[in-house]
Amino acid sequence: MRNGKRKGISKFFSRLHFLGLIFFVLFGALVVRLFDLQVLKGKESLLFAKNQRAIEKEITPDRGSIYVVDRTAGGSLKEVAVNETRYFIYIVPREIQNPEYVQQKLLEIFPDLDEELLKTRVYKQDDPFEPVIHNISSEVADYVVSLNIEGVYSTPETVRSYPYGNAMSHITGFLGYSSAGRVGQYGVEGFYDRILSGMSGFSDLEKDPRGRIIPVSEGTYIPASDGANIILTIDPNVQQKICDIAERMVSEYEAESGSIVVADPKSGSVISMCSYPNYDPNKYSDVEDIDVYINPVISRSYEPGSVFKAITIAAGLDSGAINADDEYEDTGSVRFDDYVIKNANDKVYGRSSISRILEESINTGSVFVALQTGREKMREYVKKFGFGIKTGIEIDGEAAGDISSFTKKGDIYLATASFGQGITVTPVQLVQAFSTIANGGKKPRVSIIDKIIFSEGRVFERRPELDNVRVISKQTAMVLSAMLVNVIEKGQASKAKVDGYYFAGKTGTAQIAGKGGYLQDTIHTFVGFGPVSDPRFTILVKIDKPKKGRYSSSTAAPVFSQVAGFLVQYYNIPPER
């Protein structure tokens, strides 16, 4: 009996030892595991735990808006580029039991949809998502939802809207796409993309097991900084009118394209800038040729022709190389080795004044002044007027032009450059240069920006008077202005007259350079300013490859008169005479 009892006790302790051994092994494994997790893999474990309960996301800022001031509406701001809530229609094909019915209903609501593409999408039976159409109004989206079509849904989305459409397209540009996401392209949208975009924020707050945010969690929260709002110098009413004139101008003269610019010569502020053809930035992807995105006023340089004679005369007068009352003998041509420069239509003017060079647009007279002034001085003045250098206007894609002819050896290069051949300029550079003459010899910096209002309340306001740079003397500017008035009053540009006012200006009809020489196609330009007693506007009219009208005096000049006539009435400027 005792032996049996001893055996039972022995078995009990054997089992106890075995259980103890098991617990010891398990405890040891747990210690090793904890050592591995907390010491050897401590950082990884903490990161895993954090990821399990963290809510990490980028906080997207609101893009800033672009405005203009409507002076006819009490100076109120009008949006030209703004964020709008629109709606996106999409389908969940795996929820659709009757694809044919869904396709039919969607085509009834959106008849412009690609029928074949929609069909392939609704029949993807296991697909959880397929897009249908973007940029839908809330009314249409509500209607779609009210029909309770199986598998069809709508969700809000923020889109960039351009209320003025085509009229402002070359100024605003548009919000497009890149590999990095949405990005401003062309125009002000492209130039100021970073400022308009703002700065993204970030949060990595913690959540409990049910997914609710823990109020006292030690997460990071950096709020987004919204983009700045921009106010342009453009007058929306003038812009609409000028765009209408530009479109009619291109049609009337059967031209390839055309541009009109209006600026304040004292401040350099651009009041209107319109080119045709243009596009609708709300539907920018619908264009047939993406070249239409380019603003030709700032991005396309060209040989300006005789409008440049005003710059040549300015350099000659201001440098003292010539005097206003000088005369020279025009024989109709000037020879440079194998090259001969002639006047238009082979005219010979004989004894002529400096003023007559501009009035009759005499090529040989411009050559005479340039040779008297010399290459070095001519190059100096041309650069001071702002040619060969970007103006800095706040529109994406500005070109600098090419004035290298003024650095080349050989008088032939200087001679041709004196009347706008062999060099290239942009229309906005011409506006700046003629504004310099109108502004008493001080060059304003052309600009399209009035104010930038940052989200934190800081305001940048342009002070034009700080940008003005003396290029020619006030006396030179006055004398040259009088000569340019004579171009309209007594010279070739009589069709540029504005009843009751004195305007100054210069014509330019330039052949287009091609391979092996100049083509028959021409570009017509007229640049002027006025009213001369107190200049309020610098106006440029440019017509590309017109089929009707041989010279700018019969095409661009009358358009200038129309634009100037509208402006003096719109701004209620009293007549000078």
Image (spheres, rainbow, N blue to C red):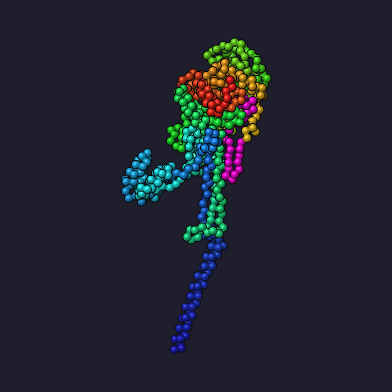
Outermost residue toward the bottom? 1
x and y percentages locating residue 344 in the rendered image: 54, 15
Image quarter of the N terminus: bottom left
**Is residue 387 among the parts visible in the rendering?**
no
In the image, taking residue 452 as reference, residue 160 lies left or right, namely left
x and y percentages locating residue 178 in the rendered image: 49, 41
Q: Residue at x 34, y 44 (%)?
A: 105
Q: Is residue 494 shown in magenta?
A: no
x and y percentages locating residue 347 in the rendered image: 55, 12
Q: Is residue 442 shown in magenta?
A: yes
Residues in magenta, as a range: 433-462
**Is residue 481 among the parts visible in the rendering?**
yes
Q: Residue at x 50, y 43 (%)?
A: 180
| Nearer to us in this view, 112 or 388 | 112
| Nearer to us in this view, 9 or 417 | 417
| Nearer to us in this view, 360 or 180 | 360
| Nearer to us in this view, 474 or 472 | 474
Does 465 sit above or below residue 349? Answer: below
Does 213 sit above or below residue 64? Answer: below
Q: Which residue is drawn at 56% across and 39% down?
A: 230
In the image, taking residue 519 as reference, residue 92 lies left or right, namely left
